[in-house]
Amino acid sequence: MQESLKKFSPTIFGIAILCFILPWVNFSCQGQHVATFTGLQLVTGTTVQQQGMFGQRQNQKVDSEPLAVAVLLFTVLGLALSFLKSRKSSLIPSIVGVVSFILLLLLKSKIESDTIRQGQGMIQVEYAIGFWLVFILFIAAIALNGYLYFDSKKEIQSMPSQT
């Protein structure tokens, strides 16, 4: 049973990587939608067209967010490490999942604090489907790999010793 469950770990991390193409963050000002960023745009940076005060359009460059880059890199690392076959192989993706989850929470906190500072309280942040799916998938990766690790420890301890 453990081998069949182990196959879900790479799937979870793979789906989390795919979620980077979905919308992650929506910004609005006084109920008006201002911008939406995907996870990939947070990783690579992007240019946003803004409406000026007198109707002219201006481009504003949004830099890459280092925490988003770290979340993506750890997600890819979790995917790669999910294919390990050793006894402790479930512990490592679980730890990577915890680190990814913490980085995701730090990213959320940084986006909120930057928005408050730069938007002077006028801009609201709403997290979109991509962000919440990755959030849930990290929890699933931690739970699954943690379960597999502790279940494999029980199996080893319950095996009769051969002397």
Image (tube, rainbow, N blue to C red):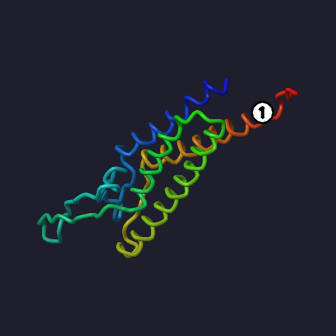
Displayed quadrant of residue 16 = top left
Judge left or right: residue 61 versus residue 29: left
Judge left or right: residue 121 versus residue 64: right
Above-or-below relation of 4 to 106: above
The residue to which callout 1 is attached is 156
Above-or-below relation of 85 to 122: above
Write the residue at 38% across / 46% down. Answer: 20
Q: Between 102 and 131, which is closer to the camera in this rendering?
A: 102
- On-image quarter of the C terminus: top right
Write the residue at 17% across / 69% down. Answer: 52
Write the residue at 49% across / 56% down. Answer: 104
The location of residue 127, given as percent across then percent down, is 44, 53
Judge left or right: residue 120 versus residue 92: left
10 Å crowding of disc 1: few (<14), some (14-19), many (20+): few
Displayed quadrant of residue 17 = top left
Above-or-below relation of 119 to 73: below
Q: Between 158 and 21, which is closer to the camera in this rendering?
A: 158
Q: Circle 1 — which element? A: helix
What amino acid type is highlighted by mark number 1?
Answer: Ile
The extreme front residue here reads: 163
- On-image quarter of the N terminus: top right
Q: Between 97 and 41, which is closer to the camera in this rendering?
A: 97
